[in-house]
């Protein structure tokens, strides 16, 4: 059942509600007896509705627009970092503070066990109710959040523990206070230090991967991305505001930004797209957690077979090769344009 359906999910939500009504009737003796008197086969009705729902979901989710994918990535019922930590990891011990001046709740992390192995896990944390959203700053990390993340990264390196990172943020905090506290330089330091961190790093983009707020903790040996997550240099609303001074054109900007998991894989920005349950991760938290766990297990085993120096060299090369471009003969290009005129 969908509690917070998006506009394109509403037909699915209607079928969910109808199926729930029939299931309730099947459990109530009086309602079941009344249905039998009317010649209604409740189990058959449920089966037919479920088949219809699956066909409808298949059709809808095979034709999502980039803006629909943004909406999916932001779905308030989607699993967040702490949901994955509670499900996939054991003995999680959260660490707080940046050892400078603050503790940013938009970044969570600490020591944990993954399939019996000690690891360090961290990530952005969003929230579902208004009070916690304000506490978590909607998942937008401040400078203290990146300093805390860097402290955890250094602990992972110091104790030779694999580092697992969950990315889910619209962007880093961008107000005057964040600028005064050095948000740009703090992100830059994270990028620099992660590129040479001497321990395996796996990054999972679970929702929004927005701007420097995402990239600041996303330099890894293996980059995984959920099917309905997005990864972009800027949030669509910000892009629309800059290009057209009109945030309402965010759907148009989404298409231009090429921000879906499919695009990220095509451009070589990620290593694997993790499939989500039909209808999205928010429909089945345990199933998507199991898929993420399986992928983490596989890639961690691969990385552990490499030497530390090989890891660092491959990581550096991986990110240096992103955004490759080819030289074009400018004279030929100009002649071509002129002749077409």
Image (cartoon, rainbow, N blue to C red):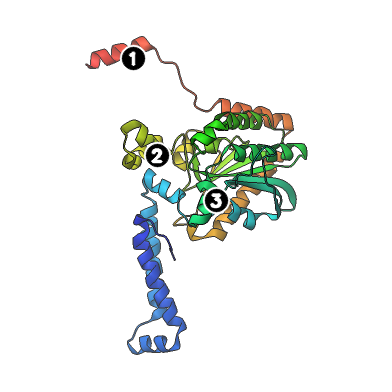
Question: Image height check: is 78 above or below 251?
Answer: below
Q: Quadrant of residue 254?
A: top left
Above or below residue 190? Residue 293 is below
In the image, 18: left or right of 261? left
Residue pointed to by mark 1: 333
For mark 3, give the secondary structure. helix
Q: Nearer the viewer, mark 3 or mark 2?
A: 3
Q: Which mark is residue 236?
A: 2
Image position of 92 (left or right of 171): right
Instruction: State which tag comes first along the sequence, 3 or 2.
Output: 3
Closer to the N terminus: mark 1 or mark 3? 3
Q: Secondary structure at mark 2?
A: helix
Q: Is residue 48 visible?
A: no
Residue assigned mark 3: 135
Left or right, 80 with respect to 66, comes to right
Say which residue appears at 32% left-offset and 40% top-offset.
249
Measure the C-alpha gap from mark 1 to mark 2. 31 Å
Q: Position of residue 96 (x, y in %)?
A: 68, 46
How many other residues sit within 10 Å of disc 2, few (<14), some (14-19) or many (≥20)?
many
Between circles 1 and 3, the one closer to the viewer is 3
């Amino acid at each position: 059942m969908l509690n917070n359906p998006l506009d394109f999910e509403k037909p699915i939500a209607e079928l969910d509600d109808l199926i729930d009504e029939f299931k309730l009737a099947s459990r109530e003796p009086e309602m079941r007896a009344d249905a039998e008197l009317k010649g209604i086969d409740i189990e058959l009705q449920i089966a037919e509705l479920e088949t219809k729902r699956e066909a409808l979901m298949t059709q809808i989710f095979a034709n999502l627009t980039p803006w629909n994918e943004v909406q999916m990535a932001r779905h308030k019922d989607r699993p967040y970092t702490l949901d994955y930590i509670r499900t996939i990891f054991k003995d999680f011990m959260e660490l707080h503070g940046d050892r400078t001046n603050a503790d940013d709740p938009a970044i969570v992390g600490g020591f944990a066990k993954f399939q019996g192995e000690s690891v360090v896990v961290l990530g952005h944390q969003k929230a579902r109710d208004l009070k916690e959203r304000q506490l978590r700053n909607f998942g937008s990390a401040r400078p203290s959040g990146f300093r805390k993340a860097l402290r955890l990264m250094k602990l992972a390196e110091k104790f030779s523990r694999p580092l697992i990172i969950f990315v889910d943020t619209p962007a880093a905090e961008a107000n005057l206070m964040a600028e005064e506290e050095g948000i740009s330089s703090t992100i830059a330091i994270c990028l620099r230090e992660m590129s040479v961190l001497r321990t395996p790093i796996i990054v999972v983009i679970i929702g929004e991967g927005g701007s420097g707020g995402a990239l600041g903790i996303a330099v890894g040996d293996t980059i995984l991305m959920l099917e309905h997550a997005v990864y972009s240099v800027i949030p669509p609303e910000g892009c629309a505001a800059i290009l057209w001074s009109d945030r309402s054109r965010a759907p148009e900007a989404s298409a231009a930004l090429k921000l879906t998991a499919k695009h990220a894989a095509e451009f070589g920005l990620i290593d694997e797209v993790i499939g989500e349950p039909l209808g999205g991760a928010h429909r089945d938290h345990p199933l998507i957690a199991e898929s993420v766990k399986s992928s983490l297990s596989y890639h961690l085993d691969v990385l552990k077979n490499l030497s530390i120096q090989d890891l660092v060299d491959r990581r550096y090369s991986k990110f240096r090769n992103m955004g490759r471009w080819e030289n074009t003969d400018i004279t030929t290009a100009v002649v071509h344009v002129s002749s077409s005129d």
